[in-house]
Structures are given as structure tokens and as C-alpha cells.
Image (cartoon, rainbow, N blue to C red):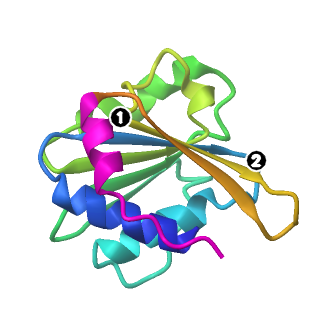
Amino acid sequence: MRSLGHALGKALIAAAGPPMVVTLQGELGAGKTTLAGGVLNALGFAGPARSPTYTLIEPYETAALHLYHLDLYRLSDASEVEALGIRDLLSERAVLLIEWPERGTGRLPGADLQISISYGAAAETRVVRLIAATSAGSRLLDDVALPPVQ
């Protein structure tokens, strides 16, 4: 997951410009925050990704991009998204990585890239689907140099 995140981070740097929205869906423990950590490492952030489960938003300012890692797991209603001021984060060179986007259905900006993570047949494996939802997402997906499958 970290390698995929790193590849995504490199592609996000190449696509820097208009804001990008990437959603991360998957069960608890599937690897969403690990993937986010790989993105951060690619952006030059040396520390581990902090899970925004309780803060809801963790901002990271790097030389390449402004990354906002959101975790909507604790929301009980989609209307709570409005209080987070997410639309105010959509500035030039901004990327929103949104975990549990289904908790904010109808209240979130449209995703450019949707990533779905599920458990594979073996406990340590994952099945990952990347779906471009916009033309910007298609260009981003084209630039993701996927790590070799092991």
C-alpha cells in the first residue's frame, strides 16, 4: 500500500495545479492510511501519516503540494461535512485524500480519482481498484507508475 501511495504521490506532483480530490474506500485496517503515508513520503514528508480519525482533517504543507488527509469515519450524518469547510481547502496545488467518503455523500466535492481497497484471498493481500472519475483523474491515473505485484 505504501508503494502504491508513493507512486500516486509522484503522479500528484506531476499533475500539480488545480485542486485534486482522491477518495479512499475500504474496511477498517485495509490500508487507507498506509497508502496516504506513501503519498506523503513521495511529497517529501519524512514522518509517518497521522490518522485523522479524531481530528477529521490532518493538513500537510510540503514544497510540492498542500495535502489534506480527511477521515470521515466518525461522522454520523453527511450534513456534518459542511462544518469542516472542505470547499475552502480546494485551492491551487491542493490535494484532498478522503477516507470513508460514503459518510459525506452529496456534500463532498466530486472525486477525480476513486480508490477502493479490499482484502484479498490471503490475509496479507489487498485488491485495489483505481477509477478515474474526471479527465483530470484520467491524466493522474495515466501517470501513476504502479509498483510490481508480488
Circle 1 sits on which residue?
A: 112
Quadrant showing the C terminus = bottom right
Dot 2 corresponds to which residue?
27
Instruction: Identify the residue at the far right of this view.
Output: 122
Which comes before the other along the chain, label 1 or label 2? Answer: 2
114 to 11, vertically: above or below:
above
| Residue 36 position within the rendered picture, expressed as x and y whole percent measured from the top left | 49, 62
Q: Secondary structure at mark 2?
A: loop
Image point 35% across, 47% down: which residue? 141
Q: Is residue 5 above or below residue 138?
A: below
For this view, does 110 lie left or right of residue 29? left
Residue at 16% across, 50% down: 93
Q: Residue at x 72, y 60 (%)?
A: 126
> Residue flagged by tag 1: what amino acid is it?
Asp
Per the rendered image, the range of residues in magenta is: 135-150
Q: Secondary structure at mark 1?
A: loop
Find residue 24 and report its horizontal and vertical position in percent: 55, 45
Q: Is residue 97 left or right of residue 102?
A: left
- Asked if residue 107 lies in the magenta stretch, the reply is no
In the picture shown, does residue 4 fall above or below 54? below
Q: Residues within 10 Å of mark 1 (few under 14, many from 20)?
A: many
